[in-house]
Structures are given as C-alpha cells and as structure tokens.
Amino acid sequence: MERNSEAKELLREAIDEGRWAGFEVLNETERTARLVRRLKFSWAIPIFGLLLSFALAIAQVSFYLAKGLPLERGSLQWNGLPFLLVTGGYLIHYLMRREERIELAIGREGKLMVKGAPSSIVALRAMLRPRSLTRSIVISGVLAAITMILGTSQVGFIPVPTPAARATIMHIPVIIGGLLEGWPVGGLLGLIFGMLSFLLAQIPVFKDPLVAILPRIFIGITAYFTYRALRRASLFWTMVIALILALLALTFSCQTVDTSLPGAIAMAIVALVIVAALIYLALRREREVMAIAMAAVVGTLTNTVLVLTVATLRRYWTPGVALGIGITHGIPEIIVAVIIVLAVILPWRQIETGRGKEEF
Amino acid sequence: MENFELLRHITIGQYLPKGSVIHRLDPRTKITALMLLALVISLNATFTGNLILFSFCLVLIVTAQLPWRYIFGGLKPALPLIIVLAILQLIFYGGTYVPPNFAPATLFRWGPIHITTGSTQLVFVSTLRFLELLFLTSLLTNTTTTTELTHGIEDMLRPFSRFGLPGHELSLVATIALRFVPILALELESISKAQASRGAKVGGGRFLEATRQITALLAPLFLNALRRAEDLVLAMETRCYLGGKGRTHLIHLRLKLADFLALALLSIFATAMLFWRNRFLI
C-alpha cells in the first residue's frame, strides 16, 4: 500500500519536472501520464534580433566616440546582420518544428518508467538522483586523480600558436566535478588544481600562490551556479543573458580592435556563436545541454579572467600583455572545455538513465 | 610505443618499499617538511640559493634510497616542454624580469630578442624550482604508504574540525586521488592504444586536430573513471560508510626522536635559506 503511494508521488514529481522542461500533460491516468511539447511561434525572437542589431550599433558608435573619430555614413557597418541571422534561423527552425512526446508509467515493481526524448529523461533523472556524502568524496577523489595525471603527463596541454605555446585542459575535471556534485566539490577540486599548478609551475607567475591557487577555487563554484541558474531558465531570461553576453563581447571586441584585429574578429565570432547556440538550445528546450555548455564557458572564463586579473594586479604582466594572453588562450580553452564537458556529462547522465525505455 | 607508456613517466603517487630513514619517519613530519621546503623554494630566486636547494633534494633522494632512473624517468615526457619554455623565457623575458639581487645586464639583443643576465637567472631558477618541487612531491608519495598519508593528513586537519572543516573526508579524498592515479594512468594508456589501433593519430597535430584527439582520449577516461567511482560508492555504502563522525582508528601516530631531529634540522635549514634568500651575490 505504502509502495503504491510512493510510486504515485514519483510519477507526480516526474510530471512536475517535465513541466519545467516545457512539456504539457496530454492525458493522465492512475499509473501513466503522457506529456507533449510543441513549439509556438514567438515574436520575442525577431525582437531580440532587432535589439542585438541596436546593440551592435551602440557598440560601434561608442567605439567611434571613444576614439574621437567623426561619425560618417560608412561608420556603421553590418548592423542588420544579427537581426537577419536570428530571424532567418528562427524561421527555418520554426518551419521544421516537430512535436515531442514522452510517456511516464509506474512499472510493476513501483518504479518509474520513461519512454521518449533522452534529454528530458536526463532532466528527470538528475532531479531524482539521491545525493550522498560518499559519492561526493569518491568523485572528488577520482577527478583529482585525473587532474594529477593531466598535470604531470603531456596529455593535459594542447598546442596553440601563442608565446606560452599551450592551452590547459586541467580545469575541466574541476568543472565536471562542480556540475556533478555541487559547489563544495567544485571548490575543493579547484583548490587541488591550484595547488598542483603551483607545485608544477615553470613560469614565475604561477609560483605565486595568489595567482596559482586563489582564482582556481572559484572555477567549480561559478560553473555550478551557472548550471543551476540556467537549468530552469525561461526563454525570456535566456535571451536576456544572451543579450548581456553579446553586448559584453561586442564592446570588448570593439575595444581590442587596436590591439589586435584578428583577436577582435575572433571575439566577435565567438560572441555570435555563443548567442546563436544559447538561443538555439533554448528553443529546442535542451535546457540541460545549454546549461552544461554555458557552465563550461563560465568556468573557463573564471579561470582565465581571474588568473589574468590577479597576475596583472600583482604586476607580473601589463594589461596589454594580459589581454593578449586572455584572447589567445581563453578562446581555445573555452572551445576545448565545452566540447569535453559535453562529451563527458551527457553520456554519463544517459548511462544512468539509458536511451529510450529504461527504468530508474 | 614510447608514447603509450604513460605510467612509467608518472612518478607521483606510487609507494616504493625501501625501509630507509625517510621511509620510517612519521607522515606528519614529511608533510610538514614538504610544505616548509615548498615555501622556501618559492621564495628563493637566486642562482646559489636554488643550487643549494637542488643539492638538498638530491641528498634526500639518496637518503631515501630511491632509484635514479625511476626519479628521472618521470621527467622524460616533460623535457621538450621544459626546454621550449626555457628558451622562450630566455628570449622574451629579458626586458621585463628584474632579478631580486642584482641589476640585469644585456648579453645579447636583436629585434624583440633580448637576453640579459636576469633572464638567464630566471631560466635557471624556474627550471630548478620545477625539478625541486617535482622531486619533493614524488619523494613524499614514494616513501609514504597511502594509509600513512591518510592518517597523517587527517591528524593534521583535526584541529580545524572545530571550525567545521571535514578533516576525515578531505583526507579520504586525497587517498582516493593518490590511489586512482596509477589506475587511471593505465586506463589512459590502454585507451590511447585502443584509439591508435583503430587508426587514430596520437600526439602531434595542430589545435583543432589536437582537440579532436584529446576528446577521443579524455571522454572515455572520464566516463571510465566515473564508472569506477560509482562501483566504489556502492562498495562503501554496502559496508555502511557514514563519514568521519564517531570513527576510531587502529593506528595512532606518535612522533619519535628521529622526527623531532628531522624537524629541528629542517627548520634550521629553512630559516637559514629564508634569511639568505636574496642576499647571495649571484
């Protein structure tokens, strides 16, 4: 009897979690529920594209004003592009839309069965997984071991054509730990990464604990909170975040035009890609994927920005040099981090849940 | 095949049973010593100071009866990188780096390439520092069993438990990490062999290709590691592991005469090195 009510509660919880992921209840019986989600046309997207175009214009004008250059007809270029890209992409997406269904049922043994789209199962499973101290301890230990291996062997570095000659991937276990087990584990792993990087450092900057250890503690923490904030963000908030990110990146890229033109172009492209990916994932309601990817971006940025800021404050580098390192290292590291974090966390969550029909 | 033998090059985290004086010291003594020496090493930025510290590390390795080939074998994969970094530092840091104990003089200048006595010192010191710290960390883990290390760390963290620091849990994290280093290194080795036998290139390549290669190695490594972690969690939970609360120990660590002696000698050495840190002529 008790088991029956427990099972019902499980079904209830699963349905509620599905609503967060944008599903609506199609029909519901005692032991089963059918959820469906359809894409509705949203005017918010073209309006967002328009705002993005204005943002680009404002960034350009501020650039000309800051430089004291006269505003001419040719000063404003490529302003319509964000609007056209966003609206065009959205129209294509809307015309190719499909509806998604998942079915929930209580199995014979009182366990919940799910059939349908894998990413929604991921969301459900993530919520229902029990937290345990033992798991936190063991996963921190294992990820710390990976950090050590990456640090002491040559696998942990990717050659990039810059003065320091390598992009690190040692912060990836930290991000993964934060995402899987919460901010305390993320902070601890960051501390371990920092201590390792302090112990194994070859350039004088990282022989300073303030540069090597302190900023690293925050990688896992910011990654975790980004993930948590974005997992349930609505389309509106996602677009607000995308707008802020795009504004930041565009202003930054306009400011760096003088220092390095390729750097500025790379920044602008990265900004556009991030915005496009955010909106695309938000539309497909792949909240998990979006949140994980953004957490990887934010975690990596925390590392790059904080380390460079502290190093500049401690006068190891001039702001110009730090900026150059930030662009040449930050971007490759972000790309690698997003790829690897997604390649690890998505299959991991699905191993726990399985594709298609699986009990959990 | 050289590329695949990762484990041979990872000297951190493996216990070598030798029974030397250093092996028999209390783990807490060794951890304190490591921290003290790391501090001294990070603060000394002179030629002489680092030479003294480096010879001190070599003496420690001899006392611990560790095989030279084993210790230096760990350096092999890092060697090209050390050399590249050293050359870059030598060439580009000349204009900006100011040594703490003498004014730099230009040795060679051509375009952006600027070699000074300061940058030669920087190269020398940073390479030696890297070696010293690597030797010391491998020395600690090569002469101390993981059980001893756990007890040592837990014991040293106990005073902080009053402020809510979970000493037992943290030391368990450290133990698991050290225990998993060789396992995961082997795992990485077999993954890279498996990828290579499927025709994937291992090593080399520029950014995009290197990224693809590394993803092909790291994604399975992480997933296997997490799977092993889940097994361990299951094993611990079936044995009713509940964390450090109310746990007692079979082994109680006690400091012996040798430990006090070692600590006293070390503090004298460290104080002297700290006092003289930027007062050597070169």
Image: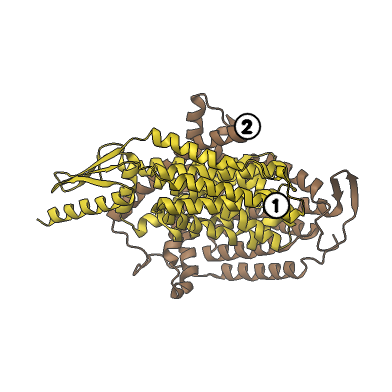
Q: Which image quadrant for residue B81?
A: top right
- Residue A65: x percent and y percent? 72, 55
- Residue A268: x percent and y percent? 62, 44
- Residue B192: x percent and y percent? 51, 33
Is B40 in front, or is A331? A331
* As drawn, B72 above or below B2: below
- Whether residue B101 appears in this view of the structure is yes
Residue identifier under label 2: B204
Q: Which image quadrant for residue B225?
A: top left
Q: At x 19% / y 55%, what residue is drawn?
A: A9
Crowding around mark 1 (Cα neighbors within 10 Å: few <14, some 14 to 19, many 20+) is some
Chain name for mark 2: B
Residue A63, numbered circle = 1
Is B60 in front, or is B279? B279
Q: Colour of chain B?
A: brown
Chain name for mark 1: A
* As drawn, A16 above or below B225: below
As drawn, is A210 to the left or to the right of A174? right
Q: At x 25% / y 50%, what residue is drawn?
A: A15
Amino acid beneath label 2: Gly
Is A131 in front, or is B13? A131
Amino acid beneath label 1: Phe
Instruction: Identify by letter the chain in yellow.
Output: A
